Image (spheres, rainbow, N blue to C red):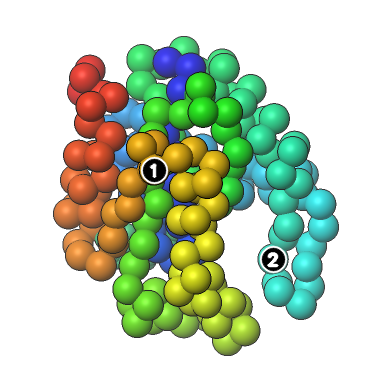
Amino acid sequence: MKKAILITGTPGTGKSTIAQMFQKEGFTVIDVGKYAKEHSLFDYYDEERDTYVVDDDLITEAMIELVEKNDSSLPLILDGHVVELPPLFLTHCIVLRCSIRLLRQRLVERDYMSSKVDENVQAEIMEVILSDMLELYGPENVSVVYTDSAVDESFSDVLSKVKKYLDDI
Ligand SMILES: Nc1ncnc2c1ncn2[C@@H]1O[C@H](COP(=O)(O)OP(=O)(O)OP(=O)(O)O)[C@@H](O)[C@H]1O
Ligand SMILES: [Mg+2]
């Protein structure tokens, strides 16, 4: 299937955790950030923010290529931040969210420096990723799932949002 499900959201909302559940169900999962790192698709390393800044054009090109090559009957799962996939290649975009208190707790537990915790918490409060995705793909192609509950429950919430595209499983 030449399509992908995009799982996105602020760091710590649970993208990779949910993506791993899809992997267990037989989906191929691409961790977009990890892929960018492995293939040097970065613009630069921002020391102050302790983060790699991806080259959006290169990463988009690479993801489109992977989607075009996907010969599974299931869509690819793209686990990552902003990927500007042409709508034609998108099955559905899931934006994971999480209560601010819990998000802060998850990020602190990762030993992020406090400026990085604050930056991500602020991004979640401002709904940066959600508004980007709504603008990019339109409300009919974007769903929000909160990950405050147990992982199994969040996964089944995500599955129920994409189920209509997944008649085969
Ligand atoms: N319902 C839930 N769904 C997803 N993750 C959960 C849930 N409840 C608790 N968690 C925990 O929250 C953390 C989420 O981390 P995870 O690495 O999946 O986030 P991420 O969005 O992939 O972050 P990053 O953008 O940095 O890659 C994990 O420690 C996970 O166990
Ligand atoms: Mg992740």
> Which residue lies most toward the right here?
44
Q: Position of residue 11 (x, y in %)?
A: 49, 64
Regarding residue 29, the answer to whether it shows in the image is: yes
Q: Position of residue 61 (x, y in %)?
A: 69, 30
What amino acid type is highlighted by mark number 2? Thr
> In percent of the image, x 79 and y 62: which residue is there?
45
Give me the disc on residue 139: 1
Give me the disc on residue 12: none
Is 152 left or right of 138, judged from the image as shown? Answer: left
Q: Quadrant of residue 20?
A: top left
Is 7 left or right of 67, judged from the image as shown? Answer: left
Q: Nearer the viewer, mark 1 or mark 2?
A: 1
Of 111 and 97, the residue lying toward us? 97
Q: Position of residue 31 (x, y in %)?
A: 53, 44
Give the quarter of the figure containing the C terminus: top left
Task: Label 1, secondary structure: give it.
Answer: helix
Look at the picture and state if 100 lies above or below 164.
below
> In percent of the image, x 58 and y 77: which residue is there?
119
Q: Rounded to the nearest whole Å, what is the CA distance between mark 1 and mark 2?
A: 30 Å
Query: What residue did someone put label 2 on?
Result: 51
Task: Label 2, secondary structure: give it.
Answer: strand
Is 161 left or right of 19, judged from the image as shown? Answer: left
Give the quarter of the figure containing the N terminus: top left
> In percent of the image, x 45 and y 40: which residue is there?
138
Regarding residue 76, the answer to whether it shows in the image is: no
Look at the picture and state if 158 lies above or below 48.
above
Q: Quadrant of residue 114?
A: bottom right
Of 153 and 39, the residue lying toward us? 153
Look at the picture and state if 56 lies above or below 63.
below
Q: Are marks 1 and 2 in contact (CB under 8 Å)?
A: no
> In percent of the image, x 37 and y 77: which residue is there?
100
